[in-house]
Image (spheres, rainbow, N blue to C red):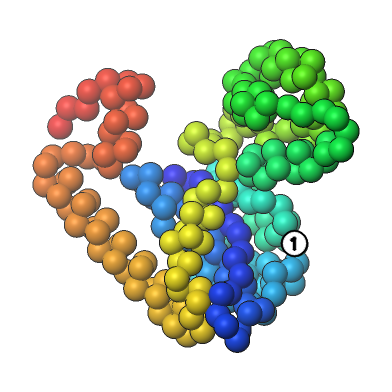
Amino acid sequence: MKFSAVDAAFSKHPIYRDGMLHLLTTRDGNNKTIVLAWAICETESGDTYDYFARQCHLAGLSRYLSAATLIVSDRQKGIKRFHDAFAAKEGRCFNHIIGNCQKHISGSGQSFNVAMAWALQRAPTETEYKAQLLILKRQSPLAAKYFDDLKPHNQVYQYAMTAEGIATHGFKTSQIVEGLNGVFVKARFDAPYRLNARILKWQGKELQIREEGIEKWIKEGHPITKYATDLFKVQVGPIHT
């Protein structure tokens, strides 16, 4: 689907506590999350993201992480170096941005309704973005300035992404990678070799399930995935085979 996310999660092993699982995920053609690549490094930094990016290039992922793809992240601890290694568009997790804004205005006596921030992010046009910004400004001028000062807007706000032709597929956060950090939480208690084995086992099982689903879908006479079919019916009309 040309929508990916990247993040790192710490090891929970009782001895190997410095290890960081770097994870790159994407959504497949049926809108299901799949792992593209991972690396276990001694820390999380610009250097480790450089290493991770080089390994992804060697694996041929630069073809997928092209200018047509959006990679979302939380912009923490050198992750910008991973973004800079690919032609893919860069997106910023809005959940993290909201948290950062709350910290930024803490102690000022001002606060804001989180729903207003999400309405600002979702605004489909620049005119509606400005209208939502004005509403937010009435509640918290500091929060409104913080959100508006985020640059460039086409990494954060739907109106700007739409104007640039960036497909978000409705995603606004890096949940497709953070969610898998949770899926692998038990594996993160293991040493690196066992952690690798657990991820490989999960990946193999998921690929088998998807292959079986695809074969069944094709036998039923459908030309594309269920997710794509449902979208097509909404946007165009019934598909005739």
Asked where in the image residue 55 lies, by quadrant, the reply is bottom right
Q: Residue at x 68, y 55 (%)?
A: 83
Q: Is residue 232 visible?
A: yes
Report x, y in % for residue 23: 55, 64
> In the rendered image, which residue does mark 1 sit on?
77
Q: Secondary structure at mark 1?
A: loop
Counting labels gives: 1
Report x, y in % for residue 165: 59, 31
Q: Residue at x 57, y 48 (%)?
A: 174
Which amino acid type corresponds to the residue marked 1 in the rendered image? Lys
Q: Residue at x 74, y 72 (%)?
A: 47
Viewer-proximal residue, 171 or 17? Answer: 17
In the image, farthest residue toward the right: 108
Give the class, few, some or many, for how many residues have Cα within 10 Å of label 1's Cα (few <14, many ≥20). some
* Above or below for 119 versus 147: above
* Above or below for 55 versus 219: below
Left or right relative to 37: residue 107: right
Viewer-proximal residue, 139 or 63? Answer: 139
Q: Residue at x 33, y 22 (%)?
A: 234
Report x, y in % for residue 128: 66, 14
Quadrant where the N terminus is found in the figure: top left
Asked where in the image residue 43 lies, by quadrant, the reply is bottom right
